[in-house]
Amino acid sequence: MKRKLIIIIIIILLVILALFIVWLPTFLMTGNRQTIEEAFAWQTDHYDTSFYEELKKTDYTMETSDGYVIHAELLENPEPTDDYVIISHGYTDNRMGALKYVPMYLKLGFNCIIYDLRGHGENEATFTTYGIREGEDLDCLIRDTRERYPKLKVLGLHGESLGVATTITCLKYKPEVDFAVADCGFSDIESVLKNGSPDILIDLADIGSRIRYHYAIKDMRPIDSLDENTIPILFIHGADDDLILPKNSEDMSNRTKGISKLCIIPGAGHAMSILTEPEMYADTVKTFLSELSN
């Protein structure tokens, strides 16, 4: 009788462990997403967003290679231009999170395309793969942009955090773009997760992710997409970013084969560089683009 009880307890514990392993990646890959209204309210609380209402805007959707629908928005420059930049936002945010970069690019002569990453904003709910599927989606958006705006002359990419993972991973498809700006990105998500959690939990989450979503956390490594990249990249990172350490940008800057610049913004936390040092940020991007054009 005692032996049977021990067996039952072991079985129950194994079932609980199995359920925990399957649940764990859900916690890491389906975080609570902000609504468009919530994200815009955050932006408004931290800087002047009045420019947004004055811009001519065009909302549209496009389908990715697997039929997923992405919501996007064109923000037209008041001064006619054939230069465009696609801005990718961070995890749990949406296209409103890209707005803080828009005034800078408008001044630099770009139209801005902001969009909701897979599983975010107005898109259908789904899990995040920290760059894998998102990079494929961006590649589709790049091709859609060139078809939608045939007079396009210059096309750039700008990413923040998860948006950097999306941008950098997309580069392995050798998209037809002229430059990329990568702000506070991670080189691989596993090291970021293990920076704040016990290794065993992330290892279990990796197992659960393979079982539940058929994607391995260990494979979510944007840095591996840079081995053959020749597209110029400007890496920007806040010196005080303790969520994603600046070393991530340093490692990616050293890994890419193409032109690479690295700027560390003093006093800036995660995804706050442009708000902490707006002039330094804008001057860095302007100088980078000027050097490329020359």
Image (cartoon, grey):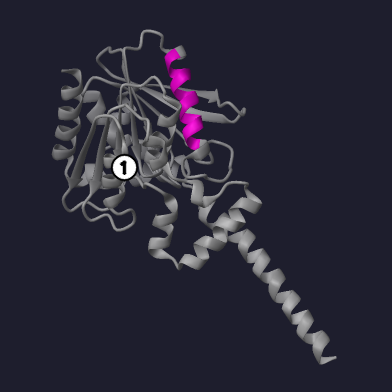
**Kind of residue sitting beneath label 1:** Met
Residue 145 part of the magenta-drawn span: yes
From what the image shows, is residue 229 above or below residue 244?
above
How many tags in the picture? 1
- Residue 255 lies, with reference to residue 54, above or below; the image says below
Percent coordinates x, y for residue 133 in the rendering: 53, 37
Q: Position of residue 178 (x, y in %)?
A: 31, 21
Local crowd at mark 1 within 10 Å, few (<14), some, or many (≥20)? many
Quarter-of-image position of residue 97: top left
Is residue 104 inside the magenta stretch? no
Q: Which residue is mark 1?
A: 252
Q: Is residue 284 left or right of residue 150?
A: left
The answer to whether residue 170 is left or right of residue 69 is: left
Dominant SS type (magenta) = helix
Residue at image point 35% right, 30% down: 229
Q: Residue furthest bottom?
A: 2
Quadrant placement of the N terminus: bottom right
Q: What segment is highlighted magenta in the picture? A: 134-146
Residue 121 seen in render: no
Where is residue 123? Give x, y as percent: 55, 36
- Asked if residue 134 shows in the view, the reply is yes
Mark 1 residue element: helix
